[in-house]
Image: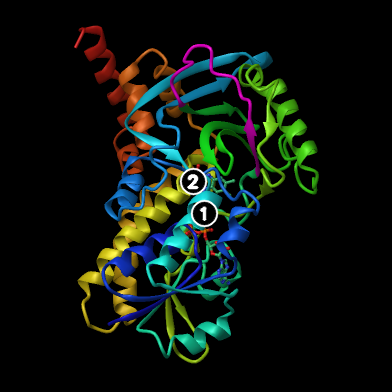
Amino acid sequence: MRKILVVGAGQSGLQLALGLQSRGYEITLMSNRTADEIRSGRVMSTQCMFHTALQHERDLQLGFWESQAPRIEGLGVSVTGPDSTRAVDWVGTLDGYAQSVDQRVKMAGWMETFAQRGGQLVIHGAAVSDLDYFSRTYDLVLVSAGKGELVSMFGRDASRSPYDTPQRALAVAYVHGLGPRPEHPDYDAVRCNLVPGVGELFVMPTLTTSGRADILFWEGVPGGPLDVFRGIKDPAEHLSLTLELMERFTPWEYARATKVELTDANATLAGRYAPTVRHPVGRLPGGGLALGVADVVVANDPITGQGSNSASKCAASYLESIVAHGDRPFDEAWMQTAFDRYWETARHVTKWTNAMLGVPPEHVLNLIGAAGGLPPVADRFANGFNDPADFENFFYEPEKTNAYLAEVSGAVGAGA
Ligand SMILES: Cc1cc2nc3c(=O)[nH]c(=O)nc-3n(C[C@H](O)[C@H](O)[C@H](O)COP(=O)(O)OP(=O)(O)OC[C@H]3O[C@@H](n4cnc5c(N)ncnc54)[C@H](O)[C@@H]3O)c2cc1C
């Protein structure tokens, strides 16, 4: 039986560990926290996952919370105009619903399942020296430790990393008591509110440790009016600042939020990181090798809500690459090939996410504006969150955007 070490128990590490376990591999999973510590700890993400990523979980029978988590049927975009008016406002329908299950619920639950199924769970914050030792006793070492210190084993790929500093300051609050959206009271959607030059507010439902909740998530341009959460330790202060900014920049969202309260004492998160693509093969001091997984090798800004989706897609892709390799050695060439196969999906996510971090060019503003009057455009944009490769067809180049808009306008005008 092949022995594999998985370091880091997040979306990608747990999905891979459970997937490999079900295929008969002998898996050791190393986590720096116990399931209870994760469950009672701080929120980590907003983790909205779209159809394809959720399907990878279902394929492994891991969609444990699917019936309890709110079904996110649509994705809406609003743009703040002058005097905080709502210059653009539309909702696109997702072909398959999205869901957000608080990572505290999911990772704790999956970790317990892994152990119950006989997996070896080691609670230990791994250092490079540990991996050096383990690389001699395991057939393969996978590092799925997110954006933690172990990324230092993997060199930054400057050719694929256009930014070397954080592009947004992040501030998350999980709340109970958010009112329904008046125009769609029974329809759950992710709401992306774009405040030009300032940042974005994302609002979405989730399943957290205390049941259904909503997430208020500000992404602020560094140094701008939303970049004010650094150093705030008091969760109540974090929430009131979140609400103040909503009142100022997105009053239509604030109107629903006047009665909210935090879900728990660890319901807030603030931070920032530079989006970074890394070389996938880590070389250990003793000569051993490790393969980087998900955020370790491709960490995008959460502005497009793709990291957990990508972690699921990376885990699914690596699982196939590992199984297809049979009993042959997991050498450097195989590691590079496994990553290259994942990069075919990830490169579209990175390109689109990095584009969304910049100042939108005129044709993109036109596209987002036009979606308000052209439902097929709104739907296609929304479904791009599930499959960002589609943006190649209508988003980046003005000619393609214009041709697409002309085509849809013609079809809609002709009553097609
Ligand atoms: C504010 C915010 C909002 C987000 N919103 C979304 C969203 O809506 N949709 C979406 O798809 N993505 C979103 N993301 C991104 C998403 O959360 C991450 O990309 C995803 O969790 C990455 O999964 P991963 O498995 O690579 O790493 P992680 O989920 O980060 O898991 C890594 C695990 O390894 C552990 N670890 C770290 N170091 C060690 C060590 N030395 N030894 C042992 N264990 C270790 C960590 O504690 C953690 O449990 C968001 C991120 C942030 C910060």
Residue 352 within the magenta-colored segment of the rendering: no
- Hey, which quadrant is residue 25 in on the image? bottom left
Residue 162 circle label: 1
Q: Quadrant of the C terminus?
A: top left
State if disc 2 and disc 1 touch (CB < 8 Å): yes
Among numbered discs 1 and 2, the one appearing first in the sequence: 1
Dot 2, how many residues are within 10 Å of its Cα: few (below 14), some (14-19), or many (20+)?
A: some
Queried on whether the Cβ of the residue with tag 2 lies below 8 angstroms from ligand 1, the answer reads no
Q: Is 118 placed left or right of 359 in the picture?
A: left
- Hey, which quadrant is residue 201 in on the image? top right
Q: How many marks?
A: 2
Residue 177 within the magenta-colored segment of the rendering: yes
Residue 404, x across and y down, in percent:
28, 25
In the depicted view, which residue is nearer to us: 210 or 142? 210
* Disc 1/disc 2 C-alpha distance (Å): 8 Å
Q: Is 165 placed left or right of 296 in the picture?
A: right
Label 2 residue SS: helix
Would residue 396 be seen by someone viewing this image from the given angle? no
Residue designated by label 2: 354
- Numbered disc in front, either 1 or 2: 2
Q: Residue at x 58, y 75 (%)?
A: 124
Residue 282, x across and y down, in percent:
46, 77
Please give the range of residues in magenta.
170-188
Residue 104 circle label: none
Q: Vertical placement of 311 versus 377: above or below?
A: below
Q: Vertical placement of 111 versus 1: above or below?
A: above
In the depicted view, which residue is nearer to us: 87 or 307? 307
Residue type, label 2: Asn
Residue 399, x across and y down, in percent:
32, 30
